[in-house]
Image: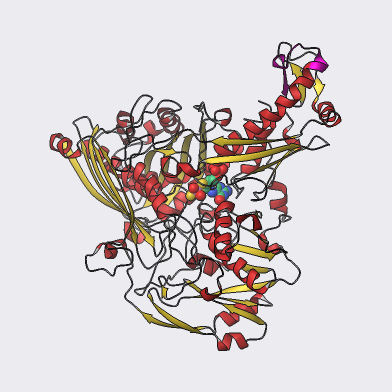
Amino acid sequence: MPAVGQSVPRKDAWDKVTGKTQYVDDLSAPGLLYAATVRSPVAYGKLHGLDTAAAAAFPGVVRILTAKDIPGRNINPLVLDDQVFLAETEVRYWGEPIALVVAETSEAAYAAAELVKADITPMTPVLSIRDALKLDAPRLYKGDNVFSSYTIKRGDAAAAFAKAAKIYEREYETPYQEHAYLETNGMMAIPGAEDQMTVYGSMQCPFYVHDAVSQILGLPRNKVRIVQTATGGGFGGKEDFPSVVAGQAALAARVLGRPVKLIFKREEDIIASSKRHPSLVRMKVGVDRDGKLVAADITYYIDAGAYATLSPIVLWRGTVHALGPYVCDHVLIRSYAMATNKVPCGAYRGFGSPQVIFASESLIDEIAADLQIDPVELRRRNGLTLGAKTVTGQTIDQSCGLSETIDKATAAAEWAKKWKPPTARTGKVRPGIGISTIYYGVGLGAGGKHLDRAGASMTIMKDGTVFCAVGNTEMGQGARTVLSQIAADALGAPYEMVNVIEADTAYVPDSGPTVASRTTFMSGNALVAAGRELKGRLLPVIAEKLGATSPDEVDLVDGFGIRKSEPAGTKIPYLDLVKEMYQRRLLPSSFGWYVAPNTEFDKETGQGDAYFVYSWCTNVAEVEVDTETGEVRVVRITSAHDMGRAINPQQVEGQIEGGTLQGMGYCTMEEIRHDAQGKLLNNAFATYILPTMEDVPELRPIIVEHPYSEGPYGAKGFGEVPLMGIAPAIANAVYNATGRRIRILPIKPEKLV
Ligand code: MTE
Ligand code: MOS
C-alpha cells in the first residue's frame, strides 16, 4: 500500500511543535465572559444554601449560577445517570462543583469564587473500598454501596480447586492514577440566534458532550453543536468529564446570552476530574503439577467515587480481563464498583484492566517462582492460542499473536541469558528481569455494543484534495494521521491530499466514544467504506478513458487510474479524474457507516464473545534495585505488540513509548493521597510525582502483525495496550532482583526497604 504501513509524517506535528496549534484557551469571542467553579469544602454533607453576597459584590462579577438556574435536567447523562452538574441539596465529594461565578475576567471569577460561603452540615464520609464494604457503612448508593457488579462463571471452580495440585491465594492493591494530560480541561460556549448553542473544547467524546449540553439546557439536539478543538491529551480522562465542563459553560452562556469560557487550572483539574480507579483484587488460583491453571476464583473491587459515571463499563472490561490471556476451564470472577465520597473515577488507558493485570500477572509470577518454573515457560504453557477458549468461553479464531510477542520480546531482551532466580542475585545494587503477557479486547465489546458504530464522510474538492470528517477524535494518539492514510488508500488518492478534520457533531452522526482503542478500527472501516464508494464512482470514468470494457478491469491506486492487468501501462492521473468528476457533475461526496462485528455476553453467567478481536502484548522489564535505599531504576523495557497491522509504524512506536512511561509511573511513583476527611492532598505536579525525561529507560518497541480479517488493512487497534502490562513486568523484575514481592502499588523506595 502506498500510505498504509508507511511512517508518513504526522499531520498535526509541525504546528504542535512550533506552537501554532490553537487549543481552546487560545480562542476568544466578542463579549467573552469567564467562569470559575465554587467547590465543596467537605467530602460528604447536606447542602442548605449559599451566601453569595460578598462574591456578587466583587468587581467584575456578572452572575453567580447554581443548580436552580438550570433550565433542563441537572444530570450528566451516562450509564446510571446520577452525576449532577451542580450540587443541589447534598455534596458527595471534596471539590464537587456547587456554583459557578461568571465574571468579566478569569481572575475576578476565581477571586470571587473564594468568597462564596456554602452552608453545609458535614456527614461521615466513606473513603475507601474496605470502608464502603462495611456492614455499618453510610449508605451512599442503594443498600450495599455497589454501583454495579458482574459475574463470570465457567465450569465448576469449586470442584476444580478440590483436585488442584496447589492453590495460591493473594491480595493485590492498586492506587489512583491521574491522567496528567498536558492541556487541562476547558470549554468555550457560544450562544447563537434561535436558541443555538455551540461549544468548543478539549474532549474525547463529542457525542457525550452533545448529550450533556442538550440535557442541561433542555434544548433539542439539532440546536446544539459540539466542536472539538485540538486536544492536548486525553488518555481516558476526557471521556466523560468534559461533558460536565461543557454543560456548565453552556449553562452560563445560555443564561447570560454571552460567550463563556470555563478553563481549569491544573490544581482543580487534579481535584475534580476523573482518575484511574483504585482497586482491591483477591486472587485464588489452582494449578496442576505442570503449572497449568485449573481453577480460578477472583474478586475485583474498584473505588468508583461519588457517582457511577463510567464505572460500570470500566468494571466490565476489568472483569473480562481478570485472569489475563490464559486458558482455564473453571473460573469464577466477581466484580464490584463501590461508591465512596471521593472524586468519581473513570476511564484511563486500559479502562479497568491495568488493575487486574497487575494482580494476575504478579500471581502468575508468584506461581512460577514457587514451582521453580521459568516465568516465560509458565506463560507459554497457559497462554491462549488459536482455537483456545477465553474465560468467557470465546474461541480465539484468528489474529492471535501472543506467542510471537513472547518469542520476539524475550529474544530481544535476551531473557534466556539474563534470567536467574533471585537467590543468585547478590551485591548492593542488583539486576532483575520480569515479564508480563497480556491481551486486550478491542472496541466496546458486548458491554457497549449498542454504541459500537462509526461514520465518516469524504468529499473530493475541486482541486483534488480530500476532506474527511469522522466521529472519533485526535487527542495526540495520531488518529488524524492514521485515518488519513487509510482514507488515502481506500480512495486511491495521495496521502498528502487527504485531510481528516477534528470531530464536529454537525458533520457526522453519533459514532460512539473515542475510547477502547477503537478509532483506527471503527473510523478506519467507515473511511474504507466511504473511500470505496467514491472510488466506485470514478471507476467507470477510468474504464472509459483506458478503453476497458468494464469498471472491474480498472482501479485507482496511489493517485493513478490503471488497468489491473497492466499496472505499469497507461495511467490516468488522479487530478484528471477529479476534473472529469466535476465536469460530469458526479457526486463528489460519500458517506461510510461501519457497525462493529457482533458480540454477545450473558449477564448471568458472563459467557459469550466478549469482544470481536483481541490485541496481544508481551513486556520484558529490566531493573536495577539498590537494596540499601530501595530505589528501583528501570533500565530497559522491551515490548512486543500485535495490533494486527501497523498502519503507521512510527506512530505505533510512539504509542508504545508513551504508554510504557505511563505504566512505569503507575508502578513506581504515582499516588493520590487524601486526608482523614477526604480532602485530596497532592493536587500539583510538585506533589503528584510523574516520570520525567530523567526517568526514561531504554525503550524497545517491537511490532508483531497478525492481521484481523475485519480490520482496515488488517488493523485491530491497540492504543491503550502499551500501558497495561508495564506495572507487573516491573514488579516481577523487582522480585527477580530482590526476592521481595510488592503487592500494593506503587513500589516506592520506603516500601521496598
Ligand atoms: N496517546 C496520546 N498521545 N494521547 C492520548 O490521549 N489516549 C489513549 C491512547 N493513546 C491517548 C493516547 C487512550 S486511553 C485510548 S482509548 C486510545 O489512545 C484512543 O485512541 P485510538 O482509538 O486511536 O487507539
Ligand atoms: Mo481510553 S481509557 O479507552 O479513553
Q: Which part of the image, by quadrant, shows the C terminus?
A: bottom left
Question: Residue 591 vs residue 67: left or right?
Answer: right
Query: Which region shows up in magenta?
Result: 544-557
Q: Residue 57: horizontal and vertical position, in percent?
A: 62, 88
Q: Is residue 549 magenta?
A: yes
- Closest to the observer, 730 or 499: 499
For the question of whether residue 562 can be seen, the reply is yes
Q: Residue at x 59, y 81 (%)?
A: 111
Q: In the picture, residue 340 is in which quadrant?
A: bottom left
Q: Residue 234: horizontal and vertical position, in percent?
A: 55, 53
Q: Is residue 432 magenta?
A: no
- Closest to the observer, 387 or 372: 387
Q: In the picture, residue 612 is in which quadrant?
A: top left
Q: Residue at x 38, y 25 (%)?
A: 386
Q: Residue 593: horizontal and vertical position, in percent?
A: 60, 36
Image: 293 above or below 573: below
Q: How many marks?
A: 0
Q: How is the image coloured?
A: secondary structure
Question: Residue 95 vs residue 107: left or right?
Answer: left
Q: Residue 307: horizontal and vertical position, in percent?
A: 41, 63
For the question of whether residue 734 can be seen, the reply is no
Image: 57 above or below 63: below
Image: 42 above or below 55: above
Q: Which part of the image, by quadrant, shows the N terminus?
A: top right
